[in-house]
Every structure is written in structure tokens, then in C-alpha cells.
Image (cartoon, rainbow, N blue to C red):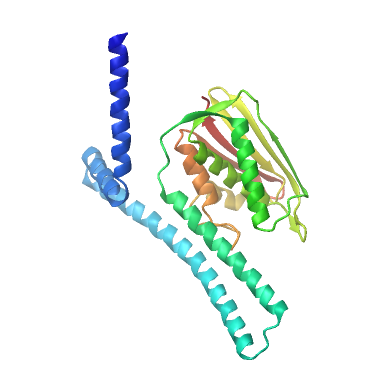
Amino acid sequence: AYVRRAAKQTIERRRKLAREAQKRKRGVDLVLALYQELEDQHGKDAADKARRLAEQLYDTLIGATVHEMRSVLTALKEDNARIIERQEADQLDPGFLRRKSLKIADRLAFMERLVEDMRNYAQPVSDERAAVAVADLLTEARSIVSENLKARNISSRNVKLSVAAPPDLAVKVSRVHVVTAIVNVLKNAYDFLPADGEGPRGEIQVRAAAKGKQAHVTVQDSGQGIPAASLDEVRQCLPGRTSRRHVGTGFGLCNARRFVEAHGGSLRIDSKENEGTTVTLVLPIA
């Protein structure tokens, strides 16, 4: 028993040191180390091909993101120019200024969401895990989405949201990353519901269930759905791709899938046009 405890403590110390070393080797150093490891295992040709593929993905990501940011900045510059013109002509009435100010605030809020989503996408997922009740994760995610909608002046009173999870169902996860994944999926569900002047309308069902050694968390909405021609592309979760200009950043589902897969799980998307969308997050049970 003594030897077993000593061996276990030694293994844990080595794992901790390895984790700390991994955290220190971030950025370019980590990429170069991974490239060298790939070359050692599979040869230089395979490593070079992987590098070129990574560069192509990087170019696609940066290109799409810069395009979104540039369009927002152009709109901000135009609004600012109109305000200056009215001010110089002494025609700056309060109604005009308020409308322009609200537009500028919305665009700045979008830029803030875009930068935050990009930061989340670029950061490594924590390898520390703890057992957490799925019901607690859903409650926290629901609260965050509610506050997010209020901050965006979006009323959710016409949305019927139901959440159900077995009280004894728990997963072993990095809490902040899994909550963020659920939040991103739930926000998408709200954004794809039909809306009018009073905000989105429809129904969202969030369900959790145990299936074997996995927990399935499903978010089902009654929204517009995804056309069959676009579904394969959406399932790829390419960063920066979005069909909702100046609303979606194109990183929500990407971050959700990345965080879930870092736990050994998966993210599934099923949808039919005009019939709604179902997103399933699969996670290992504690």
C-alpha cells in the first residue's frame, strides 16, 4: 500500500509538471514543437503538407474575420461622418443623434463579441476536470443567455423555454468551457427563431439524458432551420462563417464544438428548413 501510494503521488507530480510545461510552451514555440514532432513521426513531406493546410485554414479564418470587422468599421465611419456633417451645418437634432448613437452602440457591441469569441477560439482548453451536475451547467448557461439578451435589448417573453435534466446526471468537465459551449448553442437557438418588433417567438427545448457512458445535451428550437444545401457546411463549423451579418460572429458553434471535443465528446447538428434545428452536445459521464 505504501509503494502504491508513493507511485501514485510520483505519477501525479509528473503529470502536473507536464501540464505546467505544456502551458509554458504556447504560441509559436508550441506550434514549432508540434511541427517537429509531426516531422519526426511521419516525415518532412507530411509535416510540410500539414503546415500548408494549417496556413490555408489560417488565411480563411483571418480573411473572413477581417471582412466582418472592416464592414463594421466602415459603417461606424459613415455614421460618424454624418454626425459631423449635421453638427457643422447646425442641423444635429436629438432624434437623429439618438438613432445614430444606437447604431454605433450596436456595432461596437458586435465588435466586442467578435473579439471575445476570437480570444476564446485562440486560447487552449483547460485540461483540469471536475464532476459537475448537468442540471447546474444548464441553469448557469440559461442565466448567462438571459443576461446577454437583456444587454442586447432583446425581449424573450414570447419564447417558451423548457429545461430538463436528471438531478443525478453528472459529467467530468472543465466547467467554464462546457458552460460556454451550451451558452453559444442556446444563443444560436434564440437568434434563429422568427422575430417581430417584440423580439423572437417560438419554442426552445433543452434536454439532458444519459446514454451509456455519455451524457447527451440537446438544444432544439422551432426556428427557421438550415437549408439542406447549407447543412454540410454548417456542420464543418468553420470559424468566421456566418449567415447573420453583424449579429453572429461565426465563432459560436466553432468554439462549442472545440470545447466539447477537447473533453472527448462531440457536437452534432440536425436541421430541416422551416422545421427547426437540434444541436446535441455529447460529453463523458463522470
**118 w.r.t. 25: above or below:** below
Q: Is residue 18 visible?
A: yes
Residue 189 in sight here: no
Quarter of the image containing the N terminus? top left
Q: Nearer the viewer, residue 71 or 148?
A: 148
**Residue 223 percent across, percent down from the top left:** 70, 49
Total tally of numbered discs in the picture: 0
Q: Check the image and report above or below for 261 versus 247.
A: above
Q: Residue at x 65, y 69 (%)?
A: 102
Q: Please state the horizontal and vertical placement of residue 215, each as a whole percent of the image.
A: 57, 29
Q: Position of residue 100 (x, y in %)?
A: 65, 74
**Residue in front for this viewpoint, 1 or 53:** 1
Q: Residue at x 58, y 25 (%)?
A: 211
Left or right for 115, reference 271: left
> Picture coordinates of residue 137 (x, y %)?
59, 35
Residue drawn at (69%, 58%) of the image: 153
Residue appearing at x 47%, y 38% in the figure? 261
Q: Which residue lies most toward the top here?
A: 1
Compared with 286, 38 (above or below) is: below
